Image (spheres, rainbow, N blue to C red):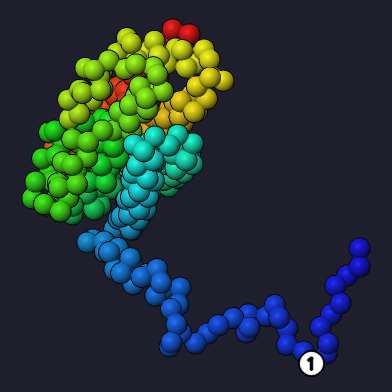
């Protein structure tokens, strides 16, 4: 190996920071492009408590990841609706990675003690993640649907409109079952034309079809891969829920939630949610 030749004496040092662009009077800078002033202007603690900053930052970051997840899920669902099976895998893989970031955020938030939290708790009154429209959208797209969860958004037509649309449209799992049907594994009518505003219920025929797929992955490779990817998404969703519950218990114990639910009890029950029932049951039957 020969060392690279030094630049001629007196020649400009190409690696020096002075070579970077510095005049942004006529072109977009980093901050302009990313609208950092707008982004940061939303970060406004209402108390002087040190940890309120952390609390707001973790919520903001989580909301940004949730919006990315919605975008990727919608793109994957659009492809599924058009009968494309390989492309959605890429989008769903990205969803899985983004979920990991969401779940990791608890590690930072967990450094806040109950006493730290109490210094600013009263400042946000009845506000709660329960009212997160983006979180609810993710749940609706994945199929966890309960019309009562639309209520906190009734005062915001811009939020409730898309949520209502999503709760009445096929979920990612409904689209997967339609694809299964199109592939010759005949899905019963009562599943295909089910009330979409409700969560899915395990169906024996669908379960039989998944058994066929899992016993013959080489014949149904795309469905098999899709099923495993969906399971990754649900697996990660469960981790997020579990970490949220643990963080809540260590911060507020069993106090009522700011959003009006029983708090930890409500979140514990949510751990029982099953998004893709046959994909879990197939493991038992194989
Ligand atoms: C120490 C911090 C936190 C506490 C004490 C807390 C507490 C709670 C509680 C008690 C609930 C139940 C609803 C209610 O308020 O009555 C809830 C729901 C929720 N929280 Fe948090 N939370 C915290 C942090 C976060 C963060 C960082 C996020 C990120 C977005 C978040 C998102 C949510 C969501 C989406 C729900 C609704 C869950 C569902 O309906 O299944 N929370 N939270």
Q: Position of residue 65 (x, y in %)?
A: 38, 49
**Residue 48 visible, this orientation:** no
Identify which residue is drawn at 15% across, 53% down.
158
**Residue 29 visible, this orientation:** yes
Q: Residue 210's quadrant in the figure?
A: top left
Q: Residue furthest top?
A: 285
Q: Is residue 56 above or below residue 167?
A: below
Specify few, some or many for label 1: CA neighbours under 10 Å numbering under 14, 14-19, or 20 or more: few
Q: Position of residue 24 (x, y in %)?
A: 46, 84
**Left/right of residue 81 with respect to residue 100 in the rendered view:** left
Q: Nearer the viewer, residue 52 or 27?
A: 27
Q: Element at badge 1? A: loop
Identify which residue is drawn at 49% across, 36% down.
86
Identify which residue is drawn at 34% across, 36% down.
81
Q: Position of residue 164 (x, y in %)?
A: 16, 41
**Left/right of residue 60 with respect to residue 95 in the rendered view:** left
Q: Is mark 1 within 8 Å of ligand 1?
A: no
Give the labeled residue for mark 1. 10
Q: Nearer the viewer, residue 35 or 245?
A: 35
Q: Is residue 285 above or below residue 26?
A: above
User: Could you tell me how many numbered marks the image carries?
Assistant: 1
**Left/right of residue 168 with respect to residue 138 in the rendered view:** left
Q: Quadrant of the N terminus?
A: bottom right
Q: Residue 84's quadrant in the figure?
A: top left
Q: Residue furthest left?
A: 155
Q: Nearer the viewer, residue 66 or 199?
A: 199
Q: Position of residue 240 (x, y in %)?
A: 38, 35
Identify which residue is drawn at 45% across, 29% down.
226
């Amino acid at each position: 190996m020969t060392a690279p030749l030094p630049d001629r004496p007196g020649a400009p040092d190409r690696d020096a920071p002075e070579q970077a662009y510095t005049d942004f009077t006529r072109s977009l800078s980093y901050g302009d492009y990313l609208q950092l002033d707008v982004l940061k202007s939303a970060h406004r603690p209402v108390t002087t408590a040190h940890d309120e900053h952390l609390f707001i930052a973790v919520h903001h970051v989580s909301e940004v990841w949730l919006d990315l997840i919605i975008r990727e899920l919608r793109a994957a669902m659009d492809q599924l609706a058009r009968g494309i099976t390989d492309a959605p895998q890429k989008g769903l893989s990205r969803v899985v990675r983004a979920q990991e970031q969401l779940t990791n955020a608890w590690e930072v938030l967990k450094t806040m003690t109950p006493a730290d939290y109490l210094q600013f708790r009263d400042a946000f009154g009845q506000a709660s993640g329960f009212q997160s429209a983006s979180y609810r959208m993710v749940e609706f797209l994945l199929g966890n649907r309960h019309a009562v969860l639309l209520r906190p958004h009734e005062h915001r037509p811009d939020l409730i409109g898309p949520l209502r649309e999503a709760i009445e449209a096929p979920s990612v799992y409904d689209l997967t079952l339609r694809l299964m049907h199109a592939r010759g594994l005949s899905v019963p009518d009562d599943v295909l034309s089910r009330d979409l505003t409700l969560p899915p219920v395990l169906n024996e025929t669908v379960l039989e079809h998944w058994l066929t797929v899992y016993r013959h992955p080489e014949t149904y490779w795309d469905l098999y891969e899709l099923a495993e990817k969906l399971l990754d998404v649900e697996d990660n969703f469960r981790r997020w829920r579990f970490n949220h519950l643990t963080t809540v218990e260590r911060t507020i114990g069993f106090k009522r939630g700011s959003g009006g639910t029983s708090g930890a009890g409500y979140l514990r029950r949510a751990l029982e949610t099953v998004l893709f029932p046959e994909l879990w049951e197939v493991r038992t039957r194989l």
